Amino acid sequence: MSTANTPAAPAQPPQLFKGIVKQALSGDSIIIRGQPKGGPPPERQLNFSNITAPRLARRPGGPGGKADEGKDEPWAWESREFVRKKLVGKEVTFVVDYKVPASGREYGTVYLGKDTETGENVTEDIVREGLAAVRKEGKSDVTKLIELEEQAKSAGRGRWGAIPEVSINPFNHSNAINKHLLGFNCFHYLSFIHIQDIICTASLQAANDKEFVGTVTECVNADALVVRLADGSLKKIFLASIRPPRPSEQGEKGEKEEKVKPKEKPVRPLYEIPFMYEARAYLRKKLIGRKVQVSVDYIQPASQTFPEKICSTVKHEGVNIAEALVSKGYATVARYRQDDDQRASDCRGKGSKGSQGFAWKGHSGAHVVDLSGDAAKSKLFLPYLQRAGKISAVVEYVASGSRLRLYVPRETRLINFSLAGISCPRAGRASGPSGPPVEGEPFGKEALLFTKDLCYQREVEIEVTSIHISGSYFGFLFIDNKNLSVTLVEEGLATVHFSAERTQYNRPLQTAEGNAKGRRAKVWQNYEDTKDEIKPEDDKTERKVDQKPVVVTEITPELHVFVQFTDDGDKLEALMNDLRRELNEKPPMTGAYTPKKGDLCAARYSGDGQWYRARVEKTLPDGEVAVVFIDYGNRENVKGRKCATLPAMPAFPRPPFAKEYALACVNLPTDKFVRADALYAVRHDTADGVFLLNIEYKTGGLDYITLADKTTKEDIAQNLVKEGFLLVDNRKERRLQKLVKDYQAAEKEAKTQQLNIWQYFNITEDDTLDGC
């Protein structure tokens, strides 16, 4: 049989490869990234077959760089930009046509698409735009490429048309446009003219966005920040050329890590990756709320997995933040290819040989226990938080004006926390995994932004009072010694909740709400006061006098007065007799009752050992509780075993017999020593006898009164002003002017005689004795 008649073997189809284009080196060369397999993704450089693009200038100081190689060939930059915009970050299919044995350089054809049949031939696109020349000396069939090149020459496209004119600054020995757009860490005053005006516009816009100053509002993790610009907009930036802690960084240096099965991505990388939280905490303490200078080094294009990243050099007070992280051992320097310009400006021309690696190698970070959303675990942890009093925490998330997520460093716990004593409008919520969209309440967004600006990612102190059924703790939060609940109410972004009456912060909350109402702030903008507000017609009337006999039982450090009305004397005596008889006949078992904050109970007073009605204000260490005796107004710390449940009798739940007031038109001096003398004088003058009480005005939900001796009819406060113990509050109400003038005359007499606080000098309400 003749071998000439034997059919030839069919040609083998070329092997297809897929990858994502990472970088465009020039108009005919790209870097393609493959799929990661147990480590960093593989990369390979591919040169386009059968074409030659204009050459870009070598980087100064690069390998083989010469003085005359500091300029690009005409259309080199445009050719590379065409390839970059078309391919970087996109998936491509490519075929390797041949490989040069001496250099190992690969040449092939790239298709933008899933396969060669439907994909777009990138080589043909480059030739069609006139951005590369066809090499005709090869063995490949380049007939179609030659046709496309002739069409580009006829149309005058790209390199076959006019050469762009560029004016270079005489102080810059390299291509100013290329250097500016590639992100070198220097600005050159340049002027250039492009016939299409494209390069000019792009370069000027890049110059405006390259450097800016902003205030850090959030440290996302160890290498990402959110800054607020001068126009109020927020921008997320990444620290260039560093690597934050990663799970793969664990283990001692030089030791081989054990092979483990791949696991899912950490749900909370900030807390689950060892020492990621410590690295973020270093940034937070150094940068939150402070201004920084940002220089954009490069922009990493978006991919199928990650969004676009603005990689920058960030400096605060001249300190490079990325370098500070590396020096503290909280990051390592990223390694780059020699021809990769996408790196931090301070890293150009530098390697990472000096990096010592992570400071925590061989250590496991603190284990963070997440209590948010776990009601059972949160309830078990409640007693500790209540006993601890004020504890430090860091605000990790702000859900609304009064709902936050906190991290307690001392106990490494994440908790949900809600502000107690207030009702705060809720902000709206977009649709997401947590459910459908929720429309926000009026001023809910303002409250959210106020709380976020004030305390997000800042160190605070908290007092936990109780817990919700969902596991969220209730309590008070303090930042810079300011109660956030009181601050929100003062700003008109919240109202006082009835539960505040059981807390020690009820009075400041009521006062803040009264002030907000008076200013018609935010939620009170449509408020109409029909009771407390001083109306013009009321202001013109005479002072009303309706005196009632009372007995003073307690004077507080704030000059508040607790009184009992004499008409209630028999009722109070009968109540006390019934209470003591019941508890003496049926004595409570020791330890049978555990007092809790807010409870109404019976407690033994240390002064006489008798039972009285009391309200628990706070639990203390060593089994003690702080109580207020509601029928007398005095406070005391008592042992929990000396408290008991009130007997089940109809008379015992009745309102307290002691009523709280404040003295009108007077104030205490500010100095603590003089203040103590003034309080002693007030208690001495009101210790015995019956007084006539008259309500003068009301502020912040509290009635202000005058007290007169029932026998002599003398005004107690006026006498104390006359003796130089109290200061006059110059009220402006017209109906109070006669009373205020009498007080002012008494104060003038005390000054003349130099009594007590006026003994050595004149003092006003805003003065203190310090330094005198």
Image (cartoon, rainbow, N blue to C red):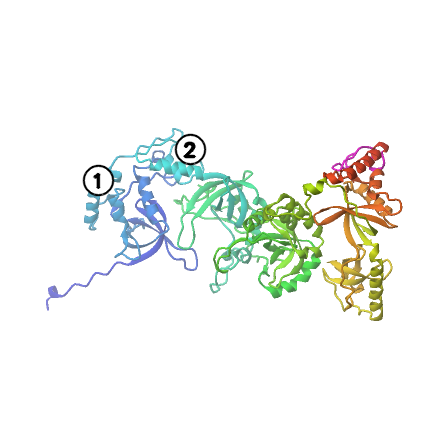
Which residue is more in the foreground, 120 or 530? Answer: 530
Q: Position of residue 485 (x, y in %)?
A: 64, 51
Q: Amino acid at mark 2?
A: His
Answer yes or no: is residue 40 visible.
Answer: yes
**Residue displayed at 54% across by 48% down:** 218
State the image quarter where residue 146 is shown. Answer: top left
Choose top left, top right, bottom left or bottom right for residue 63.
top left
Q: Which mark is residue 351?
A: none
Residue 618 image offset from top left, x and y in percent: 73, 57
Query: Quarter holding the C terminus?
Result: top right
Which residue is more in the foreground, 267 or 398? Answer: 398
The x, y position of residue 347, in whole percent, is: 46, 42
Q: Which residue is mark 2?
A: 188
Between tags 1 and 2, which lies in front? Answer: 1
Q: Residue at x 72, y 38 (%)?
A: 732
Mark 1 element type: helix
Which label is found at residue 155?
1
Q: Is residue 309 left or right of residue 618?
A: left
Tell whether position 761 is magenta: yes
Range shown magenta: 754-772
Tell me if mark 1 has few (under 14), some (14-19) or many (20+) residues whose alpha carbon lies within 10 angstroms of its own: few
